[in-house]
Image: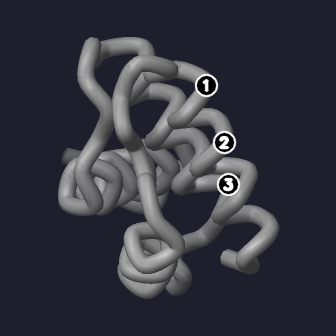
Amino acid sequence: MSQQEFANIAAMIKAAYPTSNFLPTKESAKTWFEFLKDLDSQTCMSAVREYIRNNEFPPTIAGILKGCKEENILIILEDGAIQL
């Protein structure tokens, strides 16, 4: 994902949780980007949307990574590549 795509995801999280202190510093944003930069931006955006729908507190890096793994499993199942 690009820095701009990450910025869009971060902005959505900040808008969804306006009273939180999400990414209070540039160092926080750099750390988050370091962990998320290798993810597909659309998968990450879908995972964040799903997280926001179901959680009243902002996500952690680990929470987003977990959500992206779950999104990838759903994509594989929808494509019919794997049958469980």
The numbered disc on residue 15 is 1
Residue 20, image x and y in percent?
Answer: 36, 28
Residue at image location 52% in from the left, 35% down from the top: 13
Quarter-wise, where is residue 32 in the image? Answer: bottom left
Task: Tell me which numbered mark, 3 or 2, is placed earlier along the sequence.
Answer: 2
Amino acid tagged 3: Gln
**Label 3 element class:** helix
The numbered disc on residue 42 is 3
Quarter-wise, where is residue 74 in the image? Answer: top left
Nearest to the eye among marks 3 and 1: give it. Answer: 1
Q: Find the distance from the CA under tag 1 to the CA under tag 2.
A: 6 Å
The numbered disc on residue 11 is 2
**Label 1 element class:** helix
Residue 37, image x and y in percent?
Answer: 54, 81
**Left or right: 12 with respect to 13?**
right
State which quarter of the image contains the N terminus: bottom right
Q: Find the distance from the CA under tag 3 to the CA under tag 2.
A: 15 Å
**Label 2 element class:** helix
The numbered disc on residue 73 is none
Crowding near pointer 2: few (<14 within 10 Å), some, many (20+)? some
Instruction: Mark yes or no: residue 33 visible.
Output: yes
